[in-house]
Image: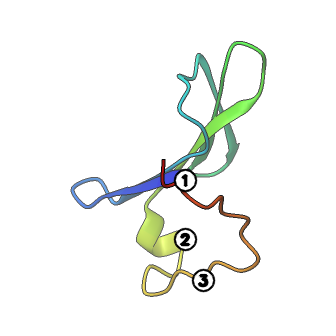
Amino acid sequence: MRINYHQDTDSLYIHLVERSGIESREVAPGIVIDFDETGKPVGIDIEHAQNILDMEKLDIESFPLKKASSA
């Protein structure tokens, strides 16, 4: 997962997976979900992010990260 903030457009994009989306649906005003060819979500675009989100803080709880192997 990767999160990008674009200051020039005040949009936040959350890449859920590294696949391209082929369809987009606005699920709420300013919130668009991108879907792949199988209908699985691949990303979330939040327009006017500073009006919707608390951009001062990012908390992650109970996130299952894999340890990097030292091969």
Picture residue at 54% right of the left edge, 74% below the top = 53
Coloured how?
A: rainbow
Query: Residue 28, how many percent across, how many down?
Result: 69, 50
Secondary element at image label 1: loop
Query: Residue 41, how many percent across, how many down?
Result: 71, 34
Judge left or right: residue 6 versus residue 68: left
Picture residue at 71% right of the left edge, 80% below the top = 61
Picture residue at 66% right of the left edge, 20% below the top = 36
Examine the rendered structure and indicate whether residue 15 appears above or below residue 50: above
Examine the rendered structure and indicate whether residue 71 appears above or below residue 26: below
The residue carrying pointer 1 sits among few (fewer than 14), some (14 to 19) or many (20 or more) residues within 10 Å by Cα, namely few
Amino acid type of the residue that numbered disc 2 sits on in the rendered structure:
Ile
In the picture, the disc for residue 69 is: 1
Earlier in the chain: of badge 2 and badge 3, it is 2
Residue occupied by mark 2 = 52
Name the residue nearer the viewer: 38 or 34. 38
In the picture, the disc for residue 59 is: 3
Amino acid type of the residue that numbered disc 1 sits on in the rendered structure:
Ser
